[in-house]
Image: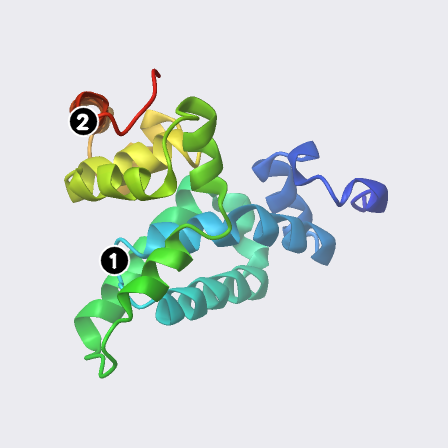
Amino acid sequence: MKINQTKMGNSDCFSDDYLFQQIQNGQYEAMQLFFNRYYTPLCRFGLNYESNPCVVEEKVADIFIQLWTNRNILDKIKNPKSYIYVIVKNSLKTVRKSEQFHQQIDEEKTINFMFSPSREQEIIENEQKEMNTNLIREILDIIPKKSRQAFELSRIDGLKYKEIAEILNVTPKTVENHIAIALKYISKALESYKKRGLLNSI
């Protein structure tokens, strides 16, 4: 059964399980849809483990190639979303341990990469329309790394607590605690900005 070409523009028409099934059957259109759905979120996620965006982009792209090459075993994967995030995490952890990087990171380039395309910015702007981009970056930067990571996976990538727990190798309760911590930091920051007159009413 082939992917309906007329629906290819909207990857939301197909579940991850269905796309994995079609990829296993050799449907390259399904591979393209899965790539388009997760490439950018995975690159952003990968920056938690490797600060060089070029390395992250290359490694994530390689993982999709490996996914296609080893498509015959995809029926063994129970949760494609968690699986692909864990693969990225483990892959970049290995890179970080085994290689020494010789280029100094361009901070502005890294920030631009993290917020482009502007999916993260759009979501936050939908919830806090009065906040500008600089304030968003400041707030995200003050959140502890693990809590920010859990928060982004939940609120930006739309993962469930159980899926995040599998990716970060923690319990769902720990994920819940991390997100609660992130929300406390955000709440305090917003209150501070409001008192300083940097925000209109939210």
* Tag shown at residue 82: none
User: Residue 132 location in percent, x, y?
Assistant: 37, 37
At x 22% / y 79%, what residue is drawn?
101
At x 57% / y 46%, what residue is drawn?
37
Q: Which quadrant: the C terminus? A: top left
Q: Is residue 158 visible?
A: no
Q: Which quadrant: the N terminus? A: top right
Mark toward the viewer: 1 or 2: 2
- First in sequence: mark 1 vs mark 2: 1
User: Residue 53 location in percent, x, y?
Assistant: 36, 66
Return the residue nearer the eye: 14 or 154: 154
- Is 68 located above or below residue 145 in the figure? below
- Which residue has dot 1 on it? 49
Say which amino acid is labelled 2: Arg
Say which amino acid is labelled 1: Tyr
Determine whether the residue tagged by mark 1 lies in a helix, strand or loop: loop
- The crowd level at tag 2 (other Cα within 10 Å; few <14, some 14-19, many 20+) is few
User: Residue 104 location in percent, x, y?
Assistant: 23, 77
- Is 193 located above or below residue 37 in the figure? above
Determine whether the residue tagged by mark 2 lies in a helix, strand or loop: loop
- Is 92 located above or below residue 54 in the figure? above
* Structural distance between the alpha carbons of marks 1 and 2: 34 Å
User: Residue 24 location in percent, x, y?
Assistant: 64, 52
Return the residue nearer the eye: 98 or 10: 10
Quadrant of res 13: top right
- Which residue has dot 2 on it? 196
At x 20% / y 75%, what residue is drawn?
98
Judge left or right: residue 66 versus residue 153.
right
- In this figure, what is the number of numbered marks? 2
Give yes or no for contact between labels 1 and 2 (Cβ–Cβ under 8 Å): no
At x 20% / y 35%, what residue is drawn?
147
